[in-house]
Image: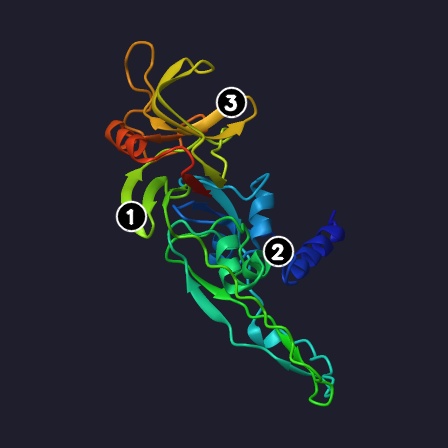
Amino acid sequence: MKRPWRSVVLVLTLWLAQIPGLAQAETLTYTVQPGDTLYQIGLRHNVDWREIQRINNLAGTWIYPGQTLMIPSTDAAPASETTQPEAAPVDSSIVTEVAPARTHTVQRGETLSGIAQVYGVTWQALATANGLANPRWIYAGQVLTVPAAAVAAVPPTVVESTPAPTPAPEPAPSAGKRIVIDISDQHLWAYDGETEVYSFVASTGLPGLDTRPGVYSVLDKIPNAWGGTWGIWMPDWLGIYWAGSLQNGIHSLPILPDGSRLWDGYLGTPVSYGCIILGVTESKLLYDWAEVGVPVIINS
C-alpha cells in the first residue's frame, strides 16, 4: 500500500531547503595566531565576533595562540541588496564643522587612553572609531583612526565675545625609565625616555592564572624571593602588583628545591602562575637597571 504522505514530506523538505537562511550553517575551524583578536578573526571570516564567542563558549574575549576556534560559515548579503538609511534633515540655521579624521601609528608602550589624551578625545570614541572589541589590546605599528569631535558653529549675529581657548592636551609622558610587557607578544621592553634599552622574550601567566594588564610600578626589589605557595625560589624579583594576598612580579626562571630551573626551555609561551618570567641573564640585567618606582605597563 502506497503512503502518499511520504511524498508530501519529501517535497516539503526540498522546498524548505531552498529558502535562504533555513539551510543548516556549516562550521570550520581556525587556529589562533599571535596577535589575533576575536574581532579581527570575525572580520576575516565575515562573522560577528560575538557569534564566534558564543559557539566556542568563551566567557570573555581572551584567546591565545594555538587555540582552535569553531567559525560559523555564513554568506554575506550582496551589497546591492542593502539599503542606506535616509539622512536626517539638516537645520540650516546651524552649521556643523567636522575636522578631518587623523591617523596615529601606535608606538611600543602606548595605551589607548594615553593616545586619546594626546589628541583630546575619549578612549571610548577612539575604540569605537577603530572597531576595537577589546580596547585594552593595541599593538606597536597598528594604525588608528583618530576621530575629531564636531563643533557647532554659532551664527555671526550671536557672537558677542571671544570664547575661551580650549586648553591643549598634555603630551603623554616619555621621559624617564619604563618597562613595557606585551602579553600577546610574550615580550618585555625596557626604555629610558625614547631609547630602547632592553628587548627580552618573556613568559606570562597560564590561562586561569593570567597576568593582569594595567599600569603599575616597581614596588620592591628582592635578590632572591621565596614563593611559599609554590615552593620555588624567584631570583631577581621585581614586585609590581598585588593579586589578593600574593604579589606578582618580574623575575628569573624559578629554582626548584632540587636546584633545577622551572619552565626552562618554555620562555615565549604563557607558563607562569601570574608573574612575568625572564631568562637568567636577562632578569639580572633588568634587576640591576630598574629602581623601585619605575613604571611598568602591561598590555594585553
Q: Which mark is residue 196?
A: 1
Where residue 271 sits: x, y (%)? 39, 28
Q: Amino acid at mark 3?
A: Leu
In the foreground, 37 or 55: 37
Pinpoint residue 137: horizontal percent, then vertical percent: 48, 49
Q: Earlier in the sequence, mark 2 or mark 1?
A: 2
Question: Crowdedness of circle 3 by 10 Å Cα count: few (<14), some, many (20+)?
Answer: few
Is 131 located above or below residue 50 in the figure? below
Kindly state the secondary structure of the residue where label 3 is placed: strand
Determine the CA span between mark 3 and mark 1. Answer: 31 Å
Query: Extreme bottom residue here?
Result: 157
Which amino acid, by three-letter code, is at mark 1?
Answer: Glu
Residue 23 circle label: 2
The residue sitting at 63% across, 62% down in the picture is: 18
The answer to which of marks 3 and 2 sits earlier in the sequence is 2
Residue 245, relative to residue 168: is it above or below? Answer: above
Identity, as a three-letter code, of the amino acid under mark 2: Ala
